[in-house]
Image (cartoon, rainbow, N blue to C red):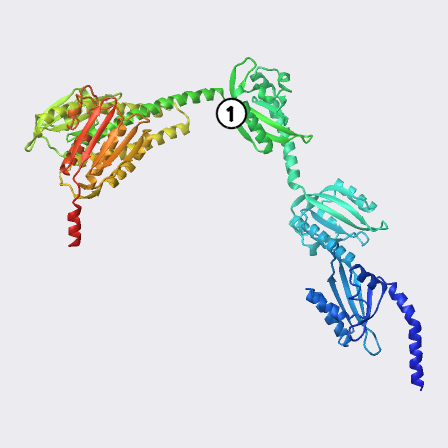
Amino acid sequence: MGSISDHRLAEKKLREFEPFARSVLDSLSANIAVLDDSGTIVFVNRAWREFARSNEADGNVAENANYLQVCESAVELGSEDAASFAEGIRSVLSGRREEFALEYPCHSPTEQRWFVGRVTRFPSGSPARAVVAHENVTERKQAEEALRLRDRAIAASSNGIVITEPSQPDNPITYVNPTFERMSGYSAQEVLGRNCRFLQGTDREQPALEELRAALQEGRGCQAVLRNYKKDGTLFWNELSISPVRDEEGHLLSFVGVQNDVTERRRAEGALRDSEERYRALYEDNPSMYFTLDEKGTVLSVNHFGSKQLGYAPEELVGRPLLDIFHEGDRQAVSHYLSASLRAPERISGWEARKIRKDGSMLWARENVRAVRGPDGDTVILVTCEDVTERKHAERERAQLLDREQVARAEAEAARQRLRAILDNLTEGVLVAEPQGRVVFANSAANTMLGSTDGKTLEELPDLWEDFHLPGAVHRCARNGENIEARVSHGENYLRVRLECLVNDERRDVLVVIQDLSEGHRLEANQQRFLANAAHELKTPLMAVMGAAELLVTGEDTDPAMRRRLLNHIFSEGRRMQRLADALLRLSRVGWDPREPNQVEVDLRAAGQRAAELAEPLVESAGLRLNIQGEGTCVCADAEWLQEVLLVLLSNAIKHSSRGGDIRLHIEDSAVTVEDEGAGISPIDLPHVFERFYRGKGSSEGFGLGLPICKELTERMGGSIAIRSREGVGTTVKVELSKADLDARDTDSRR
């Protein structure tokens, strides 16, 4: 009976306390609800109701609603935190834990929010109940995020950051960022708890330190540049800015120091001061033209020598645009150079341009320019000028001389190439020897007769003569300058030897021509005319080459680059002449080849295309156009001989065509035609063009061996060659060959 009375008394006290408890809970800012053991809401405070109403969830989380079901519905909508919170409620209601807490986001369409949900079990009573409280921690989250952002910004700063705490003894360092560590060489662990004065080492007598100590004592900001020392003892200049940090009541909490390593800037400033002092000394005393300009190109100053060179007084130039004293044709370029200098301060740039003196005369000047910062911070352009007028005149004269020399060299090389081609296609032996007997030149025929002559003297060569001493004759010809001719026998052959002195300034070389008279008087007459012309042709290029070499030997052109360029050109052109000579030698040997042709099936179109490709460089260099027309068939020919015939015909067409003209290679059936728009051949010479050594009426060069070789090769392949030409219109050469027997080939393949 007593226990029942006690229970009723407790219930009465609870009912009396309930209004007070509700009033207390309604006054709290946290959203609070009381759940029974099934998760049903049995009580919510005013903050809970208002939050539910503002989020349009009145019915879902009101009293008598099952909160666990609300959490499960949220899980279905994708909230993982709702599942964790529901599990936490169950663990508290089941007694597995006394309390549970979870921080979670709860963002609305208009703002981002964070809450902490806490679940607490009633300390006693049955059945089990739990108190659920949701507290808005958005401000704390935002403050924490801002703090993390600040910390990252400080850590990533390019300046060294130091924080000290003046409330502690000796104002120790409480924070340094990574930049400070890199700047000083000390790690954070090595400096935390120490006063910043260790960075000065023993260098304590610095005026800026007094100002810094006073600012720290007075709790105010300060800026100073200090000599600090890294961990390895290296000096660095530290531009330090300190700022006090105070709380809301104005109490000093800490000092923040921002450090900047300005060592390079201090060095540059010192170097600039030294440079300025040297510049002032040189500016007035140096016999060179000096100008200073502002960013617009206006003259700020000019030294006395510079104004005198231009015929002005210094005051007449100051304040004028610098471009006014340049030649009108150079002003745009100079303006561009000055702008480029402004875009690249401290970099020295230079150019050459023409300046006009006050009296109207012109001088060439070499300008060296650099843009620097002046004492007031403005950009100043420093200009140093050197008069290079005489050098420019010398360069122009040198260029003219070079042009003339190149023309003469080209003419000499062309003549040399023609002569070499002629000599290497002769059956006569031709050699040139020095008076001492050393052989300096020998054509193919001479090498065939005498063996290899490279680097040998006449005394070392085989003695092929009867009653004739060649070394003695060469010496006599060189000494007396007389022409010598002798007929000698060599076995069953009879030779005619002619010697002619080639006088070239100090040199007196001897031309030796060895002619085989066994083939008949007709060839003898032609060869005599040819050898006389060969002697003349050989003297011309030798004189031209020696003249050019003398220019280099005498040293009149003192420019090493120019001398190197001339020598490289001579070497390059010599190699080109060698390649052409080899090609002409090959052509000569094919033309005189006694072997029978290797007759095979040849695609005439493909052969023409290949010849055109080989001749294309010559066509382009001559400024001509080469067109291939028509289609052909397969012919029976020696592929190598056919190629040589086509190359000779194309080479002749290129040689005798004017720049801008057309060359046509027309292929039809088993015939190929080469047509040009050149000078043509006179009716008098046309019947004789296939004769060897035919010179032509009034011709100094003759027709060479090309067409006779083409005729011989074509006829030996079983074909024919014909030529048509009109003076002033052009020349057409047609080669016709036998068609390949395709039926016989098919029969052989079936066998």
From this viewpoint, is residue 586 visible? no
Q: Between residues 73 and 217, which one lies in front from this camera angle?
A: 73
Report x, y in % for residue 561.
41, 29
Q: Give the residue pinned by disc 1.
A: 352
- Name the residue at 75% across, 74% down: 91
Q: Quadrant of the N terminus?
A: bottom right
| Quadrant of the rendered image containing residue 461 | top left
Density class for disc 1 (Cα within 10 Å; few <14, some 14-19, many ≥20) is: some
| Of the pair 114 and 459, the residue shown nearer to us | 114
**456 in relation to 103, above or below:** above
**Quadrant location of the C terminus in the rendered image:** bottom left
Residue extending furthest front? 59
Kind of residue at badge 1: Glu
Query: Residue at 87% of width from left, 66% of height from top?
Result: 25
Q: Secondary structure at mark 1?
A: strand
Q: Position of residue 591 (x, y in %)?
A: 17, 35
Which residue occupies the extreme bottom position in the image? 1
Where residue 739 sits, quadrant-wise, is top left
